[in-house]
Image: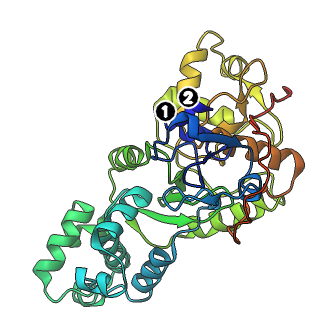
């Protein structure tokens, strides 16, 4: 645990918590703080940390396991969605207590784009749909808040890589949306073919995956609404409530032929069951390609729907998972027990520091192989 904390290994977030005696706070293992080793102790749950008198770190927010966007970000998104032509400026952000740097950083980390790019994409996505549906260019220009055709054309071309007039003859663009879940916010993306991305927003490869998706689909990525995202939200809600075993929303993964072969086989693993990497390799007819299978498994960009979390080690251990071992454990528990995964309790106050409890590792127990 100390080694994972020194390495800031996010795979252990939620598996255990690090409490700092000198400051009286507790953190996630991935927290950037650097206390001395002799000043830390470990606990297996938020409840144990609070019961021992520690308060949550404001930097890594260990009690926010549900990943709800901060109030200021949620408020900003609602205002932009309600008024797409609102041209927000730095002064407007400061007036509501948000620095432009903070907004840029948060949207970059959670959407793979700056706040200004998110606003521009949201504004132009509606214009793209209008033009593709045959409406006049003038109507699209002024409905999206632009005062001139030249400004609209420049912004449209930067976002979609084509002139507005060519939008009528193109297949569309990729729409992204942030979906809240018990395991943290998920960034979902859909094309007209189906869902092409579903990732935890704290994954280190998120921005790389967005860039790869833009390249492979040769499409712009913009925020907005889409019928497949609407269906995905409903199905994910039923899944986390233990009511849904199979997803019906169409998928549109893009990868190498070998990767797509592995991803198709992943979808054949029954709900509530697990297999090992060697068995997955055998199922695709390449029993000696276990390493390649593991790499393809790790390159899956549509989590949960393409259930790479159902692949475990040959000895029954959880092994790696891009979203963190704690999420993998909760997903498997959910599918076996058919009830919503237990969440970290909210910060409802701390208790006076009393007798310290024994440190708890709470490492994932080996899973029985199906």
Above or below: residue 277 compared with residue 91: above
Residue 79 is situated, as x and y percent measured from the top left of the image, at 42, 86
User: What is the quadrant of the N terminus in the image?
Assistant: top right
The answer to which image quadrant residue 108 occupies is bottom left
Above or below: residue 60 compared with residue 362: below
Q: Which residue is mark 2?
A: 3
Residue 242 is situated, as x and y percent measured from the top left of the image, at 83, 58
Residue drawn at x 58%, y 22% is 293
The reply, left or right, for residue 229 in relation to residue 117 is right
As helix, strand or loop, the secondary structure at mark 2 comes to helix
Residue drawn at x 57%, y 60% is 185
Distance of mark 2 from mark 1, alpha carbons? 6 Å
Residue 65 is situated, as x and y percent measured from the top left of the image, at 64, 58
Count of numbered tags: 2
Residue 8 is situated, as x and y percent measured from the top left of the image, at 50, 38
Above or below: residue 253 compared with residue 342: above
The reply, left or right, for residue 146 in relation to residue 239 is left
The answer to which image quadrant residue 94 occupies is bottom left
Instruction: Tell me the crowding category of disc 2: few under 14, some 14 to 19, or many 20 or more residues within 10 angstroms, Cα based.
Output: few
Above or below: residue 193 compared with residue 279: below
In this view, the residue in front, 309 or 105, is: 105
Instruction: Tell me the crowding category of disc 1: few under 14, some 14 to 19, or many 20 or more residues within 10 angstroms, Cα based.
Output: few
In this view, the residue in front, 102 or 159, is: 102
The reply, left or right, for residue 171 in relation to residue 226 is left
Q: How is the image coloured?
A: rainbow
Q: Is residue 121 visible?
A: yes
Residue drawn at x 35%, y 77% is 98
As helix, strand or loop, the secondary structure at mark 1 comes to loop
Q: Which residue is mark 1?
A: 7
Pointers 2 and 1 in contact (CB under 8 A)?
yes
In this view, the residue in front, 50 or 214, is: 50
Q: Is residue 260 visible?
A: no
């Amino acid at each position: 645990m100390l080694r994972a904390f020194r390495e800031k290994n996010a795979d252990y977030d939620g598996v255990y918590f690090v409490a700092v005696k000198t400051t009286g706070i507790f953190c996630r293992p991935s927290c950037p703080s650097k206390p001395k080793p002799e000043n830390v102790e470990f606990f297996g749950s938020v409840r144990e940390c609070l019961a021992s008198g520690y308060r949550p770190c404001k930097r890594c927010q260990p009690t926010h396991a549900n990943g709800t966007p901060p109030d200021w970000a949620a408020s900003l998104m609602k205002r932009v969605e309600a008024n797409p032509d609102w041209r927000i400026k730095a002064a407007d952000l400061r007036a509501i207590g948000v620095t432009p740097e903070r907004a840029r950083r948060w949207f970059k980390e959670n959407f793979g784009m700056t706040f200004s790019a998110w606003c521009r994409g949201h504004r132009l996505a509606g214009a793209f749909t209008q033009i593709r549906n045959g409406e006049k260019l003038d109507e699209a220009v002024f409905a999206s808040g632009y005062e001139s055709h030249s400004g609209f054309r420049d912004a449209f071309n930067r976002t979609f890589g084509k002139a507005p007039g060519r939008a009528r003859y193109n297949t569309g663009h990729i729409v992204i949306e942030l979906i809240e879940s018990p395991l943290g916010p998920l960034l979902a993306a859909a094309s007209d073919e189906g869902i092409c991305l579903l990732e935890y927003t704290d994954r280190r490869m998120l921005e790389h995956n967005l860039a790869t998706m833009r390249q492979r689909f040769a499409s712009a990525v913009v925020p907005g609404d889409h019928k497949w995202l609407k269906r995905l939200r409903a199905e994910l809600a039923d899944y986390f409530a233990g009511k849904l075993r199979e997803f019906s929303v169409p998928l549109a993964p893009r990868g190498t032929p070998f990767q797509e072969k592995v991803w198709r086989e992943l979808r054949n693993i029954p709900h509530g069951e697990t297999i090992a990497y060697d068995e997955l390799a055998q199922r695709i007819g390449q029993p000696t390609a276990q390493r390649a299978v593991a790499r393809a498994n790790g390159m899956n960009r549509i989590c949960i729907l393409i259930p790479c979390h159902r692949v475990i080690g040959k000895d029954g251990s959880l092994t790696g998972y891009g979203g963190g071992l704690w999420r993998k454990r909760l997903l498997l528990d959910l599918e076996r027990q058919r009830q919503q995964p237990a969440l970290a309790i909210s910060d409802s106050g701390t208790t006076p520091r009393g007798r310290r409890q024994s440190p708890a590792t709470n490492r994932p127990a080996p899973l029985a192989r199906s």
